[in-house]
Image (cartoon, rainbow, N blue to C red):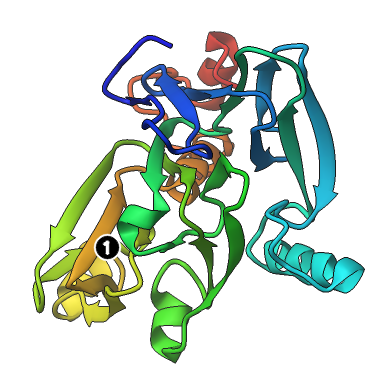
Amino acid sequence: MPQSPWSHSRSAGVSDDIDFEIKGQELQFVEIELDPGESAVAEAGAMVWKDASVGMTTVFGDGSGQQGGGFMGALLGAGKRLVTGESLFTTVFTHNGSGKARVAFAAPVPGAIVPLKLDSLGGTLICQKDAFLCAAKGVSMGIAFQRRIMTGLFGGEGFIMQKLDGDGWVFVQFGGMVVERELAPGEELHVDTGCVAAFTPSVEFDLVGAGGVRSAIFGGEGLFFARLRGPGKVWIQSLPFSRLAGRMMAAASSYGGQNRGEGSVLGGLGDLIGGNR
């Protein structure tokens, strides 16, 4: 597989290490290369294409095989996925032939697909609820509860976030461009509440006021910033999907949208003639 800044080739002696390459800029997809018997797990509907030797199986839960407890364990795993905004089902893609085979998965929104090796992050990543795209089989998905009432209400992520556990590769999707920051012990970073994409469990996540009353009302940033305190790593996204969706809904609205540079001095009739309505 050709190399790029967003690619990985297997390390010698590591049997469960998948190869991959992320292609594209704003509308990305990840191409995973599997050896015989290897599997990748993905969100339902995320597949773009696959080689014929790659079999596809839909399973309850996250497909990691780590829930235990038979049907009840699978049901519990599926329930965790449901409350984090994901589908009850995941799809497992297994290479059943010989040689190399590939399967590709795409993000549903414009932005970036970020590959992360969980064992290099201490085995756990906490991220926004809809961040998971696909992973090497063995990565499990769970729930991270936000125990602070104010942070859960106003932190932009709600009371429930997604927790990814394991030691393999996981591919998460974020909106817009993504910045990774390493915070030293005690170092603080103030972020727009919707732009917190992911962080390691050692990072403390709470809120700080966005300034005085004038700034809170007219500054356009709301009442609070998310305050991230190190040590640990954080990932920040430039364009949360909720912000993009809000702009699209405003633009599509007959009354609420802003139509700068378009339309006519004739008002609604001019918009109709010009094809803006």
Up-down relation of residue 274 to residue 191 (above or below): above
Residue 196, visible in the rendered structure: no
In which quadrant will I find the C terminus?
top right
Q: Nearer the viewer, residue 208 or 70?
A: 70
Q: Quadrant of residue 103?
A: top right
Count every numbered label the image shows and give the total. Answer: 1
Q: Find residue 49 and report its horizontal and vertical position in percent.
A: 68, 16
Q: Is residue 44 left or right of residue 233?
A: right
Vertical relation: 245 (above or below) 216: above
Disc 1, SS: loop
Say which quarter of the image contains residue 182. Answer: bottom left
Three-letter residue code for mark 1: Glu
**Image coords of residue 119 (percent x, y):** 38, 56
Q: Is residue 238 above or below residue 121?
A: above
Identify the residue under disc 1.
221
* Residue beneath the point at 28% across and 71% down: 226
162 vs 14, nearest the viewer: 14
Vertical position of residue 162 compared to residue 108: above or below:
below
Position of residue 213 in the picture relative to residue 275 (left or right): left
**Spot occupied by residue 196 in the image (x, y as percentages of width and height):** 34, 59
Q: Residue furthest right?
A: 71
In the picture, measured across the screen, residue 165 lies left or right of residue 101, that is left
The residue that appears at 75% across and 40% down in the rendered structure is 91
Tell which of 220 and 93 is nearer to you.
Answer: 93
> How dense is the environment of label 1, judged by Cα within 10 Å: few (below 14), some, or many (20 and up)?
some
Q: Quadrant of the N terminus?
A: top left
